[in-house]
Amino acid sequence: MQIKGAVAVVTGGAQGLGLAIANHLSSLGAVVVVADRNEVALACLPEHLERQQMDVTQPEQAKAAVAEILTRHGHLDILVNNAGVIFSEPFVNILNPAGIMHDYHRFRDSMTVNLDSVFIVTSAVVEQMVKRRTKGAIVNISSISAGGNEGQTAYSAAKAGVNAMTVTWSKELGRLGIRCNAVAPGFIGTESTRVALKESVLKHIQANTPLRRLGDAHEVAQAVAALLENDFINGVVLNVNGGLTI
């Protein structure tokens, strides 16, 4: 796929990793629409990025947002499902006798924002791609945690689900000319990562990464672009983690 001239939607793109992806695709010539529920962050976006207010967990909002984008541009070629929230909670917490087990409602909330949202937005976009016979491409942002990360039952389960949907959709949609891949970042030096993990944990991660550092958001954005540009890559979950899982 030629990124230049394509219309791309990046969910959760108003800040952090999503913003890096949006900026990179824009630098390659794409028309980039940032879809985010954070109106304050959307208002702070640079002028070269379009704004689209949307809660990715609400199917009707997703459909309405896609319709608006199509009204403005006439086509939608790329979807990057980036929206999500890192969430950590041990399955068993013996230091909290009053709530020793992982809270089910927090589990469901994490699954909704990290897994259901990918289904919801992709469904809205693919419906229109199929109706318009668009040869499109989808990139889902997964995580190294999809392999199972201690203290992240909900988040790991959600990202494992994202990987499974990625492969399933690549098989179903490939025959329609729509490719689906995923990027699974390791530990990236974003604000959300530093909020979610203690400094001692981050130092341990860096020490066990062959490249001895955290990743940069731009490096993940480059991986997204690589998957979009190569028309014979389909159904791949691309690890971008500095060799941490070798």
Image (tube, rainbow, N blue to C red):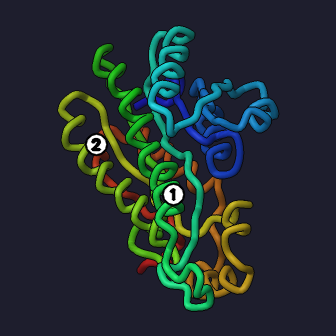
Q: Which quarter of the rendered picture does the C terminus lie within? A: bottom left
Mark 1 residue type: Ser
Using the rendered view, name the quadrant where residue 192 is placed: bottom right
- Residues 105 and 214: in front is 105
Helix, strand or loop under label 2: loop
- Residues 46 and 116: in front is 116
Helix, strand or loop under label 1: helix
- In the displayed image of the protein, which residue is found farthest to the front? 98
Q: In terms of sequence position, does the residue under pointer 1 or pointer 2 come before the other? A: 1
Is 137 situated left or right of 19 in this image?
left
Above or below: residue 215 compared with residue 85: below
The residue drawn where x is 36% and y is 19% is 128
The residue drawn where x is 47% and y is 10% is 74
Within-10-Å neighbours for mark 1: few <14, some 14–19, many 20+? many
Q: Residue 169: x and y, percent?
A: 26, 42
The residue drawn where x is 49% and y is 47% is 224
- Residues 60 and 162: in front is 60
Rounded to the nearest angstrom, the CA distance separating label 1 from label 2 is 33 Å
Closer to the observer: label 1 or label 2? Answer: 1
Q: Residue 3: x and y, percent?
A: 50, 30
Above or below: residue 118 compared with residue 75: below
Is 21 situated left or right of 104 in this image?
right
Residue for badge 2: 232
Q: Residue 210: x and y, percent?
A: 55, 82
Q: Which quarter of the rendered picture does the N terminus lie within? A: top left
Using the rendered view, name the quadrant where residue 242 is placed: bottom right
Residue for badge 1: 110
- In the displayed image of the protein, which residue is found farthest to the bottom? 94
- Residues 232 and 129: in front is 129
